[in-house]
Amino acid sequence: MQSLSPLDGRYAKQVDALRPFFSEEALMRARVEVEVKYFIALSNLDGVRELKRVSRAQEKALLGLLEKFNDRAYQRIKEIESVTKHDVKAVEYYLKEKGKKIQGLKDSLEFIHFGLTSEDVNNLAYGILINSAVKEVVLPVLQVAQGELKRMGSATKNIKLLSLTHGQPATPTTLGKEMMVFASRISRQLDQLKKFRMQGKLGGAVGNFGAHRAAYPNINWEGFRQRFVKSLGLIPLEFTTQINPHDDLAELSHLLSRINTIFLDCSRDLWMYIARGIFTQKVFKKEVGSSAMPHKVNPIDFENAEGNLGLSNALFGHFADKLPISRMQRDLSDSTVQRSIGVAFGYH
């Protein structure tokens, strides 16, 4: 394969469940979702005089663009982007192109993306995707891993073990208790992860609904923001610059980094238990444990976990340090960093 990242090569199968949330196609679809739902919500406001309320048939057709979004739709957006050199604008043009085919919608299409800046669309799209990824993939996988540690703890609760402190023989413990140490640590972090939700910014060019207020000063745009952002499953942000300040991503990065670190600690201890002969590894007849020493079975899964968790932590650490900082009302350095969010989750 010609992929630059092992996540799209060697480890492609292991991270396949994340593609619906962190591929570029997934991001484009989420942008379409935000733009379509914003347009529909805007049409339901009484004060936007020039915009006719979207009919049920039109709404069904618009939402159908989400349900039918596929590789062909993604490729069409990329074709438009090759001309515009702007991905969010390409989504807008794509929707206007599709909207012309929906009966009675042609005269309303200029209200797609009305008053929005790209970050209004992007931060909401990322929020939708990350919330879904955590709920549908990350949490279930972590719960299975934590459950396996609990099962091991219960199964080995009566197995005596010589503990080591400072690498030297210490007092006796049980293998089950040592497994439960990790299970309980993960449990506390999972309780926090279950409660976590991404935040959402909607406010135009510098966060104060400037264009919205200029066009329609009598509409309660703050109330509109509350309703719309909540409808996407996100927590509305009241005061922002042009961008979501990314404190939510920093919080999530710290949380996932702590989980990584606990599993890294667990991997190293399990590696040591194997080295001490407390655990043995299964031998599969046709598998090769070592290229030079056929009698060996190397603990590669734990060593790979250690390396990959370190990579994930490096990225999550950068997200937490970098993303909440932006010059004045914004600079663009956060945009390129956010495109690698899926990589951190992939190594997680």
Image (cartoon, rainbow, N blue to C red):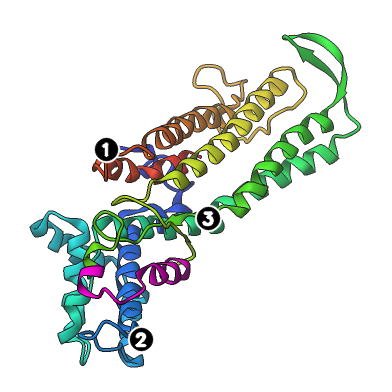
Q: Position of residue 152 (x, y in %)?
A: 78, 39
Residue 196 to residue 228: above or below: above
Q: Secondary structure at mark 1?
A: loop
The residue closer to the viewer here, 207 or 245, is 207
Residue pushed farthest front? 218
- Disc 3 residue type (three-letter): Arg
Please tell me which of labels 1 and 2 falls first in the chain: 2
According to the image, label 2 marks what residue?
Answer: 60
Range shown magenta: 212-231
Question: Would you call the spot at circle 3 few (<14 residues within 10 Å), some (14-19), or many (20 or more)?
Answer: many
Disc 3 from disc 2: Cα separation: 28 Å
Q: Secondary structure at mark 2?
A: helix
Q: Secondary structure at mark 3?
A: loop
Assign the N terminus to one quadrant of the image. top left
Please tell me which of labels 3 and 2 falls first in the chain: 2
Circle 3 or circle 2, nearest the eye: 3
Q: Position of residue 43 (x, y in %)?
A: 30, 82
- Using the image, tell me which numbered label, if any, was put on residue 197: 3
- Residue 270 lies left or right of residue 324; in this view the side is right
According to the image, label 1 marks what residue?
Answer: 327
Question: Would you call the spot at circle 1 few (<14 residues within 10 Å), some (14-19), or many (20 or more)?
Answer: few
Q: Position of residue 8 (x, y in %)?
A: 36, 44
The picture quadrant where one finds residue 154 is top right
- Residue drawn 62% across the image and 33% down it: 263
- Using the image, tell me which numbered label, if any, was put on residue 64: none
Image marks 3 and 1: residues in contact by CB distance under 8 Å = no
- Disc 2 residue type (three-letter): Lys
Camera sees residue 286? no
